[in-house]
Amino acid sequence: MAPVAARAPSPSWRDRFYTIEGQRLPSVTTVLDIIAKPALGPWYAKEERRYFETAMLEVLSRPGARDPEYVLAAVADAVTGVKAADREKQKAAAIGTAVHAGIEWELRRHLGEDAGPEPQLPEAAAWAVESWKDWARSVALEPLAIERTVYCLDCGYAGTLDLYARVKGVLTVLDWKSGKAIYPEAFLQNLAYRHAATRGGLPSTQGLIVRLPKHLDDPAWEVMPVPPTLTLEDFLAALRLWRWHRAMNGQPTGEQGMGRARHQTIPPPTGVTDGQ
């Protein structure tokens, strides 16, 4: 199947659709946003508490801090607006975007493509890219397709995989992550990409999630293969739940697919574990 140009008309990353062959398909990451993330609750609370404490200390250092009403009003004003946790998420997203840009630039240059000017990366992103280079050398990474849009019209979804490559000679779909850990939904994301990539003529033997460090005290990369116990049906269950939830809220769900997908079998991972 020849590559098809795709666009994502929605400006919101939480509501992203691709338009392919006249059909509007939700992105894989948009679909997976339906999955609850239990770790976010305590993290949100910690970030808000830390932000409140910082605001309180700053206000108490001002003239007039002995007036309780003044202190209350000033602290309330300081913490009004974008929530502290949302600010931190925005910072993390910006670093993650920079990491992807740095890796993409390195890969395109390796393939002899027009990579454009070298991106100027913040320190955290530059550290992650250097770590990625060490990992890439350790597994003889051979890039084949970078930032490729893949889709399945039968299932009714699309996405952009980070890299299709040979890892120690094994055809692999790879995702880069720059968070503190590799979370379960990353495996479903990779499964969805592998299925869509296979339908687009990019078969793979395994899927790998590569987590890259952003801090000096987290110096090593982390690589996890997608567990062989997971199947495409696990992602499709999330897709069905996402469509139901959107429909119940009167929101667009995109195309429903052209009937039951004629799924290719995605082979389980095969012995590429050394040096990952």
Image (spheres, rainbow, N blue to C red):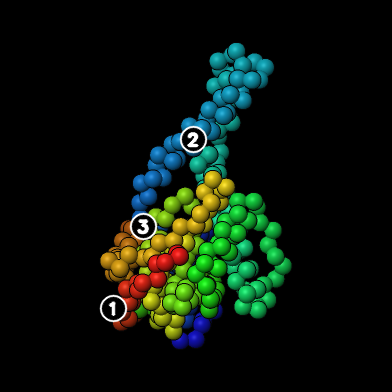
Q: Is residue 61 visible?
A: yes
* Mark 1 closeness class: few <14, some 14–19, many ≥20 residues within 10 Å: few
Left-right relation of 276 to 147:
left
Residue 129 position (above or below residue 44): below
User: What residue lies at 32% left-to-right and 81% top-to-bottom?
Assistant: 264
Viewer-closest of 10 and 209:
209
Q: Give the amino acid at mark 1.
A: Arg
Q: Residue 71 location, x and y as percent?
A: 57, 20
Residue 260, numbered label: 1
Q: Residue 149 location, x and y as percent?
A: 50, 74
Sequence order check, earlier mark of 2 and 3: 2
Residue ranking furthest to the bottom = 1
Element at label 2: helix
Q: Mark 3 points at which residue?
A: 184
Q: Name the residue under label 2.
A: 48
Q: Distance between the residues labelled 3 and 1?
A: 25 Å
Element at label 3: loop
Q: Residue 138 location, x and y as percent?
A: 52, 67
User: What residue lies at 35% left-to-right and 61% top-to-bottom?
Assistant: 242
Left-right relation of 35 to 74:
left
Q: Can residue 24 be seen in this view?
A: no
Sequence order check, earlier mark of 3 and 1: 3
User: What residue lies at 59% left-to-right and 31% top-to-bottom?
Assistant: 78
Sequence order check, earlier mark of 2 and 1: 2
